[in-house]
């Protein structure tokens, strides 16, 4: 995108006296949004005296495209208050924002709005609905929308396959891919991402190798994401040597994401020598990425080498490298509530602390022993246990228990991977409180019912 040239055009338009034209302002707003200069988009948007559906759609689409789901949904609500009816473009963007934030209730309302207003469910709108339902953990509804589509292109198939894969339904995802092969839709890079992800998340090594070979034979050049998923498949299946051999044979430079998969596997199996070499390479490639240092710290913590763990932490402090805090969100009554570990600014914080204390007592009473070795601090076990109890997903789950009743499903979205202790505790909570809990972390979905998880502890 020619950002500088666009700015020059903007300057010229203002100087020529045409800057107040609604058409020009909306075009500029859309331009800045597509250039990912969202603050400039907001500035132009604020200057539009009478905003029509096109202006609102451009703003909502800009937020959604950048993953700013809450801002997109807030804008959609403001648009409604302003009495502007959404068009198909607005609806696609709003539905996409629901998919990002896990706002299932609002997504359902949008679907109902489409039906009520008689808006034609075209290919793009239907695909957005499939994607939204799947990413909100409502797979059956995603399937229902998908099966009702009169026409399915490769993007629609890709959304369905990917949705099944992230929900841990590997067999369904591979069956869908097989069905796609019977149609005129040709698989592409995105479709095969879903297929390989399904294999990786279920430990289907033989199948993953088969689809990889088929992809190569069909002339599709693997992308970094495909290579990463194959490495992930080997690592999750504890085939560390295979993973390293595969990486060494890649015809492309080693990617940080792929190296992180190797490092996670080394941490899991406590392979210190290889893990240190991999971490060193990672830090050379991305010296300012906090995750690389955190993983190395985890590796040392896994073997109780607190001295070297402290050295890594000191490096981070000296280089002013900040970690990304865990953030989890939950939708209640149409509004998304966000929680961060250690942040008690929520207006219902005191009630939240009460339910957290109750949960902790009941979980402990069930016989659970906290996995304190996963806490990367050389502190007492009691302090580590307290830190685990305040992880963001536990705050969101506690809020769900506080503000919803059985049989409402508690749906949580987290920006990072769920830790081992939180995964175990959530299984227990689902049994003790008789609640279905769905957690979407950075990697996949976990559906907890009656003390068990859909991932079957393979994650």
Image (cartoon, grey):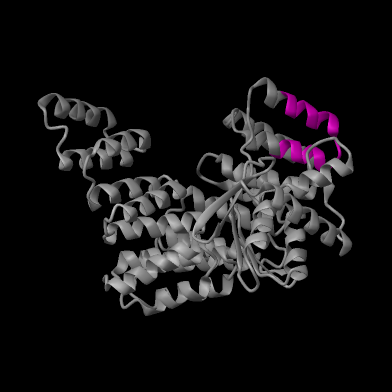
Asked whether residue 307 is drawn in magenta, I would say yes
Boundaries of the magenta span: 295-314
- In this rendered view, identify the residue nearer to me: 55 or 268: 55
Question: Given the current orientation, which residue lies at the most extreme top position?
Answer: 318
Quarter of the image with the N terminus in it: top left
Confirm whether residue 174 shows in the render: no
Quarter of the image with the C terminus in it: bottom right
Q: Residue 86: x and y, percent?
A: 28, 59
Q: Residue 350: x and y, percent?
A: 71, 48
Quadrant in which residue 326 is drawn: top right
- In this rendered view, identify the residue nearer to me: 83 or 281: 83
Principal SS element in the magenta part?
helix
Task: Tell me: 152 left or right of 375.
Answer: left
Task: Tell me: 46 left or right of 297.
Answer: left
Task: Tell me: 415 left or right of 29.
Answer: right
Confirm whether residue 136 shows in the render: yes
Asked whether residue 92 is drawn in magenta, I would say no
- In this rendered view, identify the residue nearer to me: 258 or 163: 163
Residue ID at (65%, 72%): 406
Residue ID at (36%, 38%): 36
């Amino acid at each position: 995108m020619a950002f500088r040239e666009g700015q020059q055009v903007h300057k010229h338009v203002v100087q020529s006296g045409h800057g107040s034209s609604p058409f020009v302002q909306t075009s500029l707003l859309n331009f800045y949004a597509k250039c990912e200069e969202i603050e400039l988009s907001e500035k132009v948007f604020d200057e539009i005296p009478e905003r029509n559906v096109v202006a609102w759609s451009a703003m909502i689409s800009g937020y959604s495209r950048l993953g700013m789901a809450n801002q997109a949904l807030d804008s959609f609500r403001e648009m409604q208050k302003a009495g502007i009816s959404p068009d198909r473009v607005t609806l696609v963007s709003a539905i996409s924002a629901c998919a990002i934030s896990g706002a299932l209730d609002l997504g359902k309302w949008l679907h109902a709005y489409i039906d009520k207003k008689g808006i034609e469910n075209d290919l793009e709108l239907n695909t957005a609905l499939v994607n939204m339902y799947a990413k909100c953990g409502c797979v059956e509804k995603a399937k229902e929308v998908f099966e009702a589509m009169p026409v399915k292109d490769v993007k629609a198939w890709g959304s369905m396959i990917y949705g099944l894969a992230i929900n841990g339904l590997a067999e369904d995802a591979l069956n869908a891919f097989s069905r796609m092969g019977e149609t005129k839709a040709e698989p592409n890079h995105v479709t095969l991402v879903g297929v390989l992800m399904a294999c990786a998340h279920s430990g289907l090594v033989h199948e993953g190798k088969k689809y990889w070979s088929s992809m190569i034979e069909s002339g599709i050049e693997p992308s970094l994401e495909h290579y990463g998923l194959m490495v992930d498949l080997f690592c999750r299946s504890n085939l560390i040597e295979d993973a390293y051999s595969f990486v060494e044979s890649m015809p492309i430079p080693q990617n940080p994401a792929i190296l992180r998969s190797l490092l996670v596997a080394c941490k899991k199996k406590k392979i210190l020598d290889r893990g240190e070499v991999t971490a060193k390479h990672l830090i050379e490639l991305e010296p300012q990425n906090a995750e690389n240092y955190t993983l190395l710290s985890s590796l040392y913590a896994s073997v109780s080498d607190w001295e070297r763990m402290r050295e890594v932490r000191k490096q981070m402090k000296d280089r002013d490298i900040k970690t990304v805090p865990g953030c989890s969100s939950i939708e209640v009554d149409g509004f998304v509530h966000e929680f961060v570990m250690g942040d008690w600014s929520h207006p219902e914080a005191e009630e939240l602390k009460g339910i957290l204390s109750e949960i902790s007592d009941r979980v402990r009473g069930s016989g659970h022993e906290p996995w304190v070795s996963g806490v990367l601090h050389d502190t007492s076990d009691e302090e580590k246990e307290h830190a685990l109890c305040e992880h963001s997903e536990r705050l969101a789950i506690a809020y769900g228990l506080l503000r919803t009743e059985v049989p409402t499903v508690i749906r949580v979205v987290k920006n990072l991977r769920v830790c081992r202790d939180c995964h175990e505790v959530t299984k227990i909570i689902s049994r003790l409180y008789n609640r279905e809990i769905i957690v979407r972390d950075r990697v996949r979905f976990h559906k907890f019912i009656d003390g068990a998880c859909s991932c079957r502890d393979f994650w």
